[in-house]
Structures are given as C-alpha cells and as structure tokens.
Image: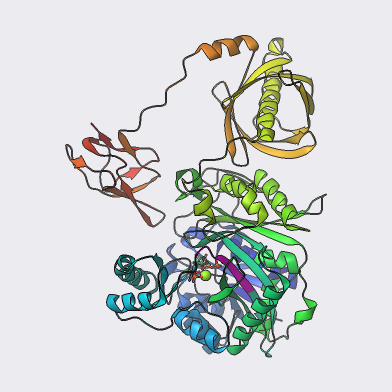
Amino acid sequence: MFSKILIANRGEIAVRIIKTCRRLGIATVVVYSEADADSMAVEMADETVFIGGAPASESYLVADKIVAACRQTGAEAVHPGFGFLSENAGFAKRLAAEGIVFIGPNPGAIEAMGDKIESKKFAAKANVSVVPGHVGEIDDTDHAIRISEDIGYPVMIKASAGGGGKGIRVAWTRKDVEEGFPAVRAEAKASFGDDRIFIEKFIESPRHIEIQVMGDKHGNVVHLFERECSIQRRNQKVIEEAPSPLLDEATRKKMGEQAVALAKAVNYDSAGTVEFVAGQDRSFFFLEMNTRLQVEHPVTELITGVDLVEQMIRSAYGEKLAFKQDDLKINGWAMESRIYAEDPYRGFLPSIGRLVRYSPPAEGKSADGTIVRNDAGVREGDEISMFYDPMISKLSTWGPDRLSAIDAMGRALEDFHIEGLGQNIPFLAAVMDQDRFRKGTLATSYIKDEFPEGFQGTAPTDFQADLMAAVGCAMHRTLTRRASPQLDRDDWVVVAGADTRTVRLSNGGDSFKVELPETGRVLSLTDIAWRPGQPLFRGKLDGVAFTVAVKPAAEGFVIRHRACTLKVLVLTPRSAELHHKLPPKKAADTSKMILSPMPGLVVTLDVELGQQVRSGEQVAIIEAMKMQNIIRAERDGVVKSVGAKSGDSVAADEVLIEFA
Ligand code: ADP
Ligand code: ADP
Ligand code: MG
C-alpha cells in the first residue's frame, strides 16, 4: 500500500480523506493556500506544503505546485477530492508522466466522460438511455433555434464543459433561445474556457437520481446503488438521500446495469457517478458522468458500509475490488443536508464571515439506533472565506427506514448551533418537516414549488406553540429565581407571536409541570439541560426530545425550534394587562427605501438625485462572494437621496436609495 498520499484539496473533503488514510496507516500531506494556513485539514495532516495565494487559480488549480509538493515530501499518490483538479485529464496525465499515482480514474476515462457531448455519444453507444437532443456542437443562434424546434420546447441549453450547475439554461420559447444561447455560450467561455454548447429536451418536473459506481484496474466494475438529489436550488444539490424513494427493484437494477455498462465502455477504474434525470413514471435518461468522488458520497457509505475513499486508494494502488455486485446490499436509509453559509431569509444570499459559534451535534450511534455523521472542515472561530465553496458542513443521518432517517436529521439540525453568519439550518429543518418531503414526492422543482415566495420560516405547529410557551416560562422562571426570588410565582402569561396564554409552572430544577388553565391541559417539561447564558435549551416535552435555540431579547426571548422562530414574552398577569393596552409598535416604513439585501461591495449605483425610477429597473450592483447581485427597484419613484456610491462597502439593510 502507499505510505504517503498528498491531498490536493481543502476543507471538509481534505479532512474526510485524512480520516481514511489514518485508519489505513497512510501518512498525509495537505497543500494549502494563504486563506487556509490555520485550517483544520492543515492541523490534522502529517505534513503540509504552502502553495500560494487564496484564489484557487494561484494555488489549488496549479498543477506545477502540486507536483513540486509531491517531490518535496515524497508523496507517492495524489487524491484530488472534488472540484479543483479532480476532473482534469491533463493533470492526471501529468502526474503519470512524473511517476505519481492519481487517485481517480485513468485519464482516458476522464476525457471520455468529462465532456458532456462526448459522454453522451459513449452513453448512446453503450445502450444507455440518453435525454433526447442534439448530441453535437452548435454553430450559432439560428442553428440553436432550428435544433430547439426539432426537439420541441422546452429545451435545455448546456455548456459541454459545464459543471456545478453553471452553464445551463431552460428555454420555453424561440425568444428564450435567442437570449439564452449567447448567454450560455458567454458563461461557458468565461467559466470553463470552452464555449461548445449542446441542446437537449428539458424533462419537466424530473427527479435527479444517480448511480455510484466503483471499478478497479482489472476490468471489474460494480455499482453501489442510487442516490436521489432532487432537492436542488439553481441546479445545485441541497439535500440528498440513498436509496431513492422513487425506485423499485426492477428500475434500480436497470439503472445500475446501464451505469456499469457505461463505466465498462470507458474502462472505468475508480469511484464515479452516473447521473440521470428520471420522470415520475420511473423513465430515466443519462445526464452526465462525474469522474470523481461526489460531494454526497456519505449517504452511499452509510447504506452500504463501504468506505469509498478507501476503495479509491486501493484501486489506484492496483488492488482488485474486494467485493462483487452480489455482496452489496442496501441497509436502511440515509439523508444528507448541505449546510451552506447563506441566508435563507434573504433569498439565500451568500453570507461570509467568522463562525463565532460552531457546535455540531454529537456524531455516532444514538440510543434509538440512528446514526449522525458530520463531514466538516471547520472549527469554531474559523472563517468561511469568499474564495471557495460556501459549504460549512455536510450533516448526514442514517435510520432503518426513510422516516427514521428524516426524523434523525430533524433532531440533528436542532442540535447544530452556528452563530456569526447566515446559514440554512432553519430552511433544511423546514424541508424535513414538510408532508410532501416525508411522502417522498420529490422533483428538482421542489424548492420552487414549495417556497414560491422564498423562505420566511414556518408558523408554529400545536406542539411548537406549547413548546415555546413552556420553554419561555421555564427560562424566565429560572432567571427570576436567581435574580429576584421575591418575584417568583407559579402563574404567568406568555405572549408568543400571536398567541397569548396563561401558564402555571410548578416544581423546578430539571423538570416542570406545565398547566394551561385555559384548556385544562397539563404538559410535562423534563430532562432540562440549560443554564442561563447558554444558546441551546434541551429537554423533553411530554416525552418528546427537543432542542431549541434561545436568545434573550427586550422583555423576553427569541426562541427558534426548527424553522419556527417566535418572540416570546413572559409576563405577570398584571403586566400582561398593561402590555395589551400598549399600542403595537409600528415597524419602520421602509417601503420608500431600497436597502442592501446583504453585506458587500457596491460595484455600481446607477441613479441620480431627482431621477425617475421605474419598478424593475436596475439601480445598483452589489458584489458578495464573487457573485454580482443586481438590485432592482420594487416600485416607481423619484430618487430623494442616495446612501452609497461605487466602491463603498455596505452592510445588510443599509439604505442605498430613498424615494421622495
Ligand atoms: P456534485 O454532484 O458532487 O454536487 P457538482 O457538479 O455540484 O457535483 O460539483 C461538485 C464540487 O465541485 C462542488 O464543490 C463544486 O463547487 C465543484 N465544481 C464543480 N465544477 C467545477 C469547476 N468547473 N471548477 C471548479 N469547481 C467545480
Ligand atoms: P452539472 O454538471 O452542473 O451538474 P447537469 O447536467 O448534471 O450539470 O445538470 C444539473 C441539474 O440540472 C441536474 O441535476 C438536473 O436537476 C437539471 N437538469 C439537467 N439536465 C436536465 C434536463 N434535460 N431536463 C431537466 N432537468 C435537467
Ligand atoms: Mg451534475
């Protein structure tokens, strides 16, 4: 076996690879950029090599520097992780020429599959069902229109070299093609340095289902079943699971066989993924093959018990696969949530910054038999940098069946505490709680279908309304007993959002009896684990374990359970009477302002004092995390004042423009 491996990547995947190397007794070298000098991967590696500036083009993407680092440390092989150089055939060839092993497929397979046009040709030859379309390059917009009309709208315009959800556009009409074809071409040129475009039928309301394959250098290829990744935003995966709730045994077998046939057709000899779009009727069509380890590989590992990184290392070393197709079985169900540094309440805008608090749920098997796994490359105090992917971690759970995996995910998300930047945990929790998700009626349009107005949190369920009242009261009582015991009492009025109710709280310590005199119900709040100042309150309400995030606020608390956040006031009956007589506080009128939706840099601010602006008109561009966000007026108006200029840094909610 190899004695030393270099990891040409960063973040969670570098950490993930180190863990397997340690178990196999292989020493690790991690290369790092300026932005990653203090990273967790650097801390865990046996050796490290600095390779340059923070932009990937100065460090992680420079093959020369990776080769030099191998020479310097004597590493015999390179694991590229995903992204960066992982699907770069030139890099794989270069390593081979230097006598260094690439832990991934042979360059021929990368070349054949790395290009979407080429891979479709291979797929068609291997009798894999492909999306109907034009498998070939397209000369110009007129040609694109002719092809689109032959295929029939809607169609998808795609960059052959595309990846990561980039270089893709749906066209419903001729006009969409006229606009979309040049746009995709320009984006492809800019992002991939390759402007070859093809067009295929857009499968409506499809599901994304992919097959994990694993091959060796002796001609053996097996598949490790499917993953479903239909919960996507902007063609990027957010929640993945294995197996898929759509497939029956017969379809699973067919898809698996086609994936293996395609892999064999290109002499595939490592871990790879064959992606399909599937109709609700279980028809399926080949999309592309990813010739690398996939972000969502943990769910496959959880249902098969196979360590895919280990298998990649073994096959790169020349070992034969230690298992045959019949040795592999699906055991239970696994879910993965991608925890992103983005603010779901503000249209999922990227949010960078320091992880002021970072406390993931405990990993491993719990008393009920479910498993939690968290793949992360960060620690408390680390920075989520603007230079790389905004993923904070991948939280996975396993259960004997789908609903137990979902419930375990819901609980694990409750126990995940992050402060310092926007993160999508409440959004992920909302999905876990949705009926449609729990029924498994998925589609790639799921997020658009279920959150047409974006995400604003969810209204309290009956359980959550009880929970907020009980927890608010319990915290208030604990604080009162400490600070002013003479004010301690059993009867309180709790105002939680729109709900006001009387609560009688007795006993104390780590459990309370919670009486609700208005309805005559009695709840029990037990197993309390919370001390004043702690951000998470854990306990059981009528035996149901929960964790809520709590923050002190003026006259009360802000409490969040999953996707439901409420301001909770705990008052004496007397002050509750007064409270209801107070006129409700009016929110500041911001309808005449355009606010910056996120912190960022003003690239342009295109209006002048006195200018008439129409609804929908572009007024500014704010750049954050390398993404330019166009800010548009939401109403007509005449500009009364301008609050920023090009080059300024602005905070979230800073006033950009005020109308008269
Ligand atoms: P997956 O199916 O594993 O989600 P993606 O296509 O979303 O695959 O990409 C996986 C990873 O590779 C992501 O971290 C993404 O940002 C990165 N990635 C994808 N394409 C590119 C590319 N062309 N250049 C750099 N990174 C990329
Ligand atoms: P990438 O290389 O960026 O991952 P893919 O070709 O895998 O690009 O497409 C990304 C996503 O776009 C898929 O997961 C799927 O949801 C959607 N998609 C791609 N092609 C089609 C299609 N022909 N019809 C419907 N949806 C598609
Ligand atoms: Mg894809």
Q: Nearer the viewer, residue 456 or 417?
A: 456
Q: Does the image show residue 323?
A: no
Q: Nearer the viewer, residue 84 or 156?
A: 156
Residue 67 at x, y = what percent? 51, 79
Quarter of the view holding residue 242:
bottom right
Residue 149 at x, y = what percent? 36, 75
Q: Quadrant of the C terminus?
A: top left
At horizontal 32% and vertical 78% (from top left) the residue drawn is 146
55 on left or right of 430 = left
| Range drawn in magenta | 202-211
206 within the magenta span: yes
Q: Quadrant of the N terminus?
A: bottom right
441 within the magenta span: no
Residue 5 at x, y = what percent? 63, 75
Residue 444 at x, y = what percent? 53, 61
Q: Nearer the viewer, residue 248 or 621?
A: 248
310 on left or right of 263 = right
On screen, residue 261 above or below 288: below
Q: Does the image show residue 477?
A: yes
On screen, residue 578 above or below 387: above
